[in-house]
Every structure is written in structure tokens, then in C-alpha cells.
Image: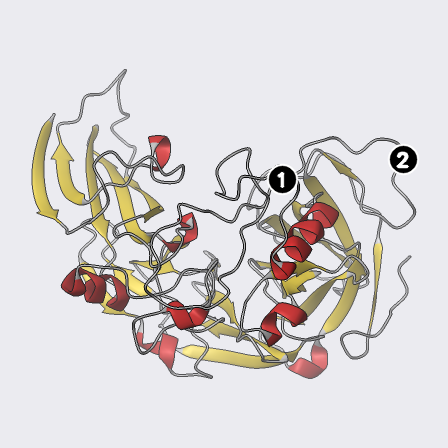
């Protein structure tokens, strides 16, 4: 194996760092490499051609207050196959925030578990505002370019998908609504279109758009939502785009104090908005399911007059609510150490007086996932599920048309109870059948 060092970037993290999200598998890499003549176990097929890309979050500087792994700067790793050989490369995504902090030699933006006023920089990004656009959540390929994106809406940073050469920002990404683009946009390989959504913290509408195969914005729609929400993923079929309004969103009480704390609203259903790919807000159909937060969707396709959606059902909504209430009130459970390490408290206390003179408290806000199996039969209307996989049919959503199944992953292990759709404004209590 032959290795060439391309560049090494500044970092002030301690050599003996013992932070749980900066050690072990999380240990950051600050050097860019090219490697070829890689050692191979077995044989690479001669006709295997292509590139595998992975986006990762990489800690570079000590945080202003607290570090959360979602705040790491984007580093793209690639393995390219061709002619029976493989090459490796890794590159930081040269975002505006990354370059500014490299020049300053320190963190300039507050993290997601901090008060926004802790930021040293005078401007920021993200649906919340005053965050660093790390572009570290996702990477896709559209029109021959790799696009790195950020989960709270930022720019789409362009790279050569093989050499990882920087190609700056997708210019269409800043020409509408000022929202940027949320992570997990989707590419339809049959049409060459890219589908995306975006949002802002106080906006009652969710933006939905389509970029055509020539890189032009062909559709952009303001979809009325039940209120400001934080969807993380989307799905699509041949004719429909599926957006979601989760039951988990920012706590109103915390917002009044300037904090952004997620709260699970167990009395509010999960809502799906189905819109024709190039449709209007008037054509949106709404469906309801049991309250939950959808992190990722794995597949969607049309089956006759139904849209079938596969994804993951989060079981720990009530646990999450207790966590949030503890954080908002500044309370800890008896016996909690308060340092946020594994086995310690479920949440950290917010700063009483936000400033940017604090040191790294080595505290990480953690949401613990309840892995315990649900016992007994689920109550009526609750999505049937095995493990954490959910499978639901959205009835009467699509008219009978020739269908193409877009497979994005394995189907859920069990079929969900049908969820009946209805017209009308979001937030209306539609019947669920």
C-alpha cells in the first residue's frame, strides 16, 4: 500500500483526550490522505467500477461549552474501484465555518446543546440559527457531483465524487426563501431529479423543491404545516413525495428562555403530507399515525392506489419527554453526577447566564434509546412493528397508475395498520381507520 499525505489541519484537542465522543471509534482524524495499491484480501472483480462515499463528523477544536458529535466538521471518505484495484482518499469539506475556525484557531459557534448567544461569530446557519453549517450529515451524488449537507438546513457543498476536489456551493441552494437545504435530499435515478425540503425555526410552512436533471430549480412549494417542525428525512415514489411533521419539536417553554430543546408531544399524531412531485400546496393530502419521531425512512413505493412507506418507529417518546422536562427546569435525578458521561444523567443543565468564557464541561446531552421490546398487543390504531421497523400503507393517496418501485432498503418485518387519509388543513383531527 502506498500513502501520500495531502494536508494536515489545525486542532487544539488534547493528545490524551478522553471525551466519550472523541475517543475510540469517534477519535477524530485531522490529516487528509491519498492511498493506492491497497492491500486486498481476496480479489476485486475487474468489472467492479465506482466510488463509495461516506460523510463523517470530525471534532477539530475544543467547544465553547459542550461538544455534541453532530457538530463535528464534515470529512468525506472515499474508496474508488476500477480495473481490479482500489484507491482511498479523505478530505475535509471546506465549509465557510470550517475555514473561519481554521483561521481563528478555535471554535466560533455554539453547539446544539448550548444557548445560541454563546457563539463568538457574528452570523451563523441552520434552522435554529447561529449554528455552524458543518455539512456533515449526509452525502449524495447528483449530476456527477457529490453534495454534502447539514441536518438543520445549510448549503449543499459540491465536491468531485472521485478526487474529492472542492467545487464550492451549489448556487441554486441559496436562491429561495433563505432556508438552505435539509440533509437527506433524494435523487431519482430514472429522471435525474433531486428532491429536497427545508424549514426555519418559526416558519409555519415547510419548503419542498425539485431540481431537474439540468440543475435548475423546477418546483418550489410552501407546504402549510401544523406549526414549526423538525423533520429529518423524506421519501418519494414515482408520482408522490412524502414529507412528515413529527410529534417531536422544540419546547415552547425553553424557546421563551432562548433555548432549543426537543420535546416529544405524545398527544400529537405523526402527520404525513403527500404531494404530487410537481404539485401545489392545494394538492397536499394529509395522513396521521401514532405519535413518534421519524429519524430515517428506508423505502416508499406505489402499490395500486396505495403508497407504501417503510421506516423506523421510535419507542422512547415518553423517556425523551422526561429528559426534556429535566433539562428545562435544570433538575437532575437523584444520584446523577452531572457530567453527561455514559451512565450519568440523561440531560445536562443549561447555563444560567450564557457567555462564551466557559470551558469544556465534557458534558454531552444524550438521548437514551429504549431498546426494551414492547410487551403485549399494541393498542388500536398503533402501528404494528417488529423491533424498531415500521411499515405503513397510506390509503387512497395515489390513483391507480403504472407503478415503479423505488427500493431504498429492506422492508419492515410486519405490515402496519392502514392509516386513512383526508383532505383539509394540517392539524385538523382526521379520522384514522
Q: Is residue 62 left or right of residue 286?
A: left
Q: Which residue occupies 83% across, 74% down?
A: 428
Q: Nearer the viewer, mark 1 or mark 2?
A: 1
Q: Position of residue 423 (x, y in %)?
A: 82, 75
Where residue 420 sits, quadrant-wise, is bottom right
Q: Position of residue 175 (x, y in %)?
A: 38, 83
Q: Position of residue 373 (x, y in %)?
A: 75, 30
Mark 1 / mark 2, whichever is N-terminal: 1
Nearest the eye: 356 or 398: 356
Where residue 430 sits, quadrant-wise, is bottom right
Tell me, yes or no, if residue 237 can be seen here. Answer: no
Q: Position of residue 238 (x, y in %)?
A: 60, 60
Which class describes the residues within 10 Å of circle 1: few (<14), some (14-19), or many (20+)?
few
Residue, disc 1: 369
Residue, disc 2: 377
Residue 91, above or below 350: above
Q: Quadrant of the C terminus?
A: bottom right
Nearest the eye: 425 or 127: 127
Which class describes the residues within 10 Å of circle 2: few (<14), some (14-19), or many (20+)?
few
Nearest the eye: 149 or 374: 374
Nearest the eye: 191 or 181: 181
Amino acid at each position: 500500500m502506498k500513502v501520500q499525505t495531502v494536508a494536515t489541519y489545525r486542532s487544539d484537542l488534547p493528545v490524551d483526550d478522553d471525551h466519550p465522543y472523541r475517543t475510540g471509534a469517534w477519535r477524530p482524524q485531522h490529516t487528509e490522505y491519498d492511498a493506492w495499491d491497497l492491500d486486498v484480501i481476496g480479489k476485486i472483480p475487474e468489472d467492479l467500477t465506482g466510488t463509495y462515499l461516506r460523510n463523517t463528523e470530525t471534532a477539530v477544536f475544543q467547544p465553547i461549552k459542550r461538544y455534541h458529535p453532530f457538530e463535528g466538521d464534515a470529512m468525506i471518505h472515499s474508496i474508488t474501484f476500477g480495473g481490479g484495484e482500489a484507491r482511498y482518499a479523505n478530505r475535509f469539506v471546506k465549509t465557510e465555518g470550517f475555514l473561519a475556525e481554521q483561521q481563528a484557531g478555535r471554535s466560533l459557534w455554539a453547539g446544539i446543546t448550548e444557548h445560541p448567544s454563546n457563539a463568538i461569530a457574528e452570523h451563523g446557519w441552520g434552522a435554529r440559527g447561529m449554528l455552524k453549517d458543518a455539512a456533515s450529515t449526509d452525502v449524495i451524488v447528483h449530476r456527477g457531483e457529490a453534495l454534502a449537507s447539514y441536518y438543520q438546513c445549510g448549503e449543499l457543498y459540491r465536491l468531485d465524487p472521485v478526487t474529492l476536489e472542492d467545487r464550492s456551493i451549489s448556487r441554486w441552494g441559496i436562491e429561495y426563501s433563505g432556508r438552505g437545504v435539509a440533509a437527506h435530499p433524494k435523487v431519482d435515478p430514472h429522471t435525474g431529479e433531486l428532491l429536497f425540503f427545508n424549514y426555519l425555526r418559526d416558519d409555519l410552512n415547510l419548503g419542498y423543491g425539485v431540481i431537474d436533471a439540468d440543475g435548475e430549480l423546477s418546483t418550489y412549494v410552501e407546504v402549510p404545516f401544523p406549526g414549526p417542525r423538525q423533520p429529518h428525512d423524506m421519501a418519494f415514489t414515482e408520482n408522490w413525495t412524502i414529507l412528515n411533521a413529527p410529534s417531536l419539536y422544540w419546547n415552547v417553554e425553553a424557546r421563551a428562555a432562548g433555548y432549543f430543546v426537543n420535546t416529544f408531544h405524545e398527544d400529537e399524531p405523526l402527520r404525513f403530507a403527500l404531494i404530487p412531485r410537481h404539485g401545489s400546496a392545494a394538492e397536499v393530502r394529509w395522513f396521521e399515525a401514532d405519535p413518534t419521531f421519524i429519524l430515517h425512512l428506508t423505502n416508499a413505493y406505489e402499490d395500486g392506489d396505495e403508497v407504501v412507506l417503510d421506516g423506523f418507529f421510535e419507542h422512547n417518546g415518553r423517556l425523551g419527554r422526561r429528559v426534556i422536562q429535566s433539562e428545562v427546569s435544570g433538575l437532575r435525578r437523584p444520584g446523577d453526577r452531572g457530567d453527561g458521561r455514559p451512565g450519568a444523567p440523561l440531560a445536562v443543565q443549561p447555563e444560567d447566564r450564557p457567555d462564551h468564557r466557559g470551558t469544556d464541561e465534557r458534558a454531552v446531552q444524550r438521548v437514551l434509546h429504549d431498546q426494551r421490546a414492547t410487551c403485549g398487543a399494541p393498542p388500536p390504531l398503533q402501528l404494528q412493528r417488529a423491533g424498531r421497523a415500521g411499515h405503513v400503507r397510506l390509503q387512497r393517496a395515489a390513483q391507480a397508475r403504472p407503478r415503479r418501485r423505488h427500493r431504498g432498503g429492506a422492508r419492515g418485518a410486519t405490515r402496519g395498520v392502514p392509516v386513512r387519509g383526508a383532505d383539509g388543513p394540517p392539524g385538523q383531527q382526521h379520522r384514522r381507520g
